[in-house]
Image (cartoon, grey):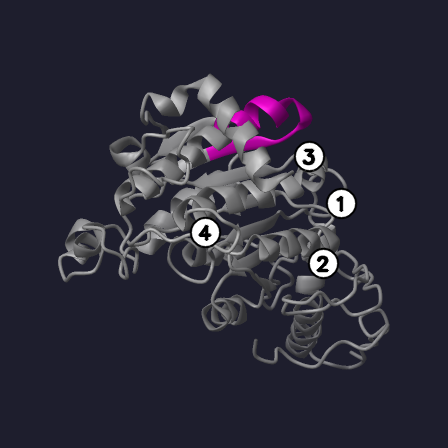
């Protein structure tokens, strides 16, 4: 990531002294704006771990139009794969500014982890959520593309290739260490591939990247997700209904592989995982939802043998498909929503409304079997 400015020195945020004697009112507000802006830039990322929201401050000649909510930093060690490190000191509230509140005098923000955030739906949702003031944490496979989005938004990022489960395990450990609270885990990474391939872990790559890897990440993060009363979101697809037909004796599609079937099976697994996660953990505070983002104009299927490549990668795609922003808005709606009010936990959504998928997608026994088999495959 690019340099966002000099690292704060210990105690710097708590020891700023401003001299406004004999300054005109306009100059006072200009100075305040510059000083508070500097503190916000230095503190925004580190405050994510503690769940404090930093609101941009607007000024006019009369006074503050927005009050800024300030929190404090807690030290944590540099983690490999993370773009930033918290300064090893506490940042105290600026006494002149009153925190906007949600009952405790300080406005809370959500810490939102988004996988598959280097482009497409994930990057679009990250931009939307960052604009709302949420603490967004990106996870991507491509170092260059993920860093570019993180640099644009000035947010932390982690790298992990979901075709390598050891990287998923390391990712989970780093997230747990850096973020004692995770309000939203958006399992968005995935995709369709071409010919059948097996990962070094021994699984068909489409099934691993789309289902086993996010299942592993979610399971390893369960202690944090439970204590945070988190929302766990799965980017599924209408392909679950059109192409998915899970065979519990052939989850790796050794007998009947096609790119479309493998993708449909994995997206069906996302819905079943959502329903079973709800059944097992909703009483412990976790809410879960799966959603179809729409047919989004991305580079989806560009390097596969699936006929989807002709839909997503031709000049007609702009006429047939929705923009990544609209696809990302579906994820944003769930992330910003309130389970039980905005949406119901355990359900599958399309266009922000409950939707039907295949008959298998509502098979509670199949959902339990898939969970148990996934645990067995991953040796959890």
SS of the residue under disc 3: helix
* Horizontal and vertical percent position of residue 328: 40, 50
Mark before the other along the chain sequence, 1 or 2: 2
Q: Which residues are magenta?
A: 274-289
Q: Residues within 10 Å of mark 2 (few under 14, many from 20)?
A: many
Left or right: 247, with 295 as reference point: right
Pointer 4 residue: 189
The overriding secondary structure of the stretch rendered in magenta is helix
SS of the residue under disc 1: loop
Mark before the other along the chain sequence, 2 or 3: 2
Pointer 1 residue: 105
Left or right: 181, with 202 as reference point: right
SS of the residue under disc 2: helix
Mark before the other along the chain sequence, 4 or 2: 2
Q: Any magenta on residue 199?
A: no
* Horizontal and vertical percent position of residue 111: 63, 49
Q: Residue at the spot x=51%, y=53% of the render?
A: 115
Q: Is residue 344 visible?
A: no
Between tags 2 and 3, which lies in front? 3
Q: Residue at the spot x=28%, y=47% of the render?
A: 259
Mark before the other along the chain sequence, 3 or 1: 1
Pointer 2 residue: 47
Q: CA distance from mark 1 to mark 2?
A: 16 Å
The reply to whether discs 4 and 2 touch (Cβ–Cβ < 8 Å) is no
* Horizontal and vertical percent position of residue 117: 47, 58
Between tags 4 and 1, which lies in front? 4
């Amino acid at each position: 990531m690019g340099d966002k400015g000099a690292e704060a020195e210990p105690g710097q945020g708590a020891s700023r002294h401003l001299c406004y004697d004999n300054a005109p009112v306009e100059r006072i507000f200009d100075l305040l704006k510059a000083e508070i802006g500097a503190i916000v830039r230095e503190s925004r990322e580190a405050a994510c771990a503690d769940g404090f929201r930093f609101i941009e401050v607007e000024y006019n000649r009369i006074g503050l139009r927005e009050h800024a909510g300030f929190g404090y930093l807690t030290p944590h060690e540099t983690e490999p794969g993370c773009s930033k490190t918290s300064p090893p000191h506490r940042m105290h509230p600026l006494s002149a500014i009153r925190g906007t509140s949600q009952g405790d005098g300080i406005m809370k923000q959500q810490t939102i982890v988004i996988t598959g955030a280097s482009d497409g739906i994930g990057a679009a949702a990250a931009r939307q959520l960052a604009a709302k003031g949420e603490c967004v944490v990106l996870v991507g496979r491509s170092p260059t593309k993920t860093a570019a989005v993180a640099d644009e938004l000035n947010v932390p990022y982690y790298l992990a290739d979901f075709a390598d489960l050891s990287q998923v395990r390391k990712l989970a450990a780093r997230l747990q260490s850096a973020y004692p609270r995770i309000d939203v885990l958006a399992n968005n990474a995935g995709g369709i591939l071409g010919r059948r391939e097996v990962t070094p872990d021994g699984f068909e790559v489409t099934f691993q990247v789309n289902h086993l890897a996010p299942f592993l990440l979610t399971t390893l993060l369960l202690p944090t997700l439970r204590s945070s009363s988190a929302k766990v979101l799965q980017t599924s697809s209408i392909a679950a209904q059109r192409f998915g037909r899970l065979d519990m004796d052939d989850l790796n599609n050794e007998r009947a592989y096609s790119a479309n079937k493998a993708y449909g099976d994995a997206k069906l697994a996302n819905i079943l995982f959502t329903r079973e996660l709800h059944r097992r953990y909703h009483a412990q505070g976790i809410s879960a939802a799966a959603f179809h983002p729409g047919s989004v104009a991305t580079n989806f299927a560009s390097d596969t043998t699936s006929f989807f490549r002709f839909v997503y990668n031709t000049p007609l795609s702009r006429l047939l498909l929705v923009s990544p922003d609209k696809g990302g808005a579906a994820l944003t709606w769930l992330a910003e929503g309130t389970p039980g009010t905005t949406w119901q936990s355990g359900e599958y959504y399309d266009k922000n409304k409950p939707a039907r998928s295949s008959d298998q997608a509502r098979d509670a026994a199949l959902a339990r079997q898939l969970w148990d088999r996934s645990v067995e495959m991953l040796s959890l």
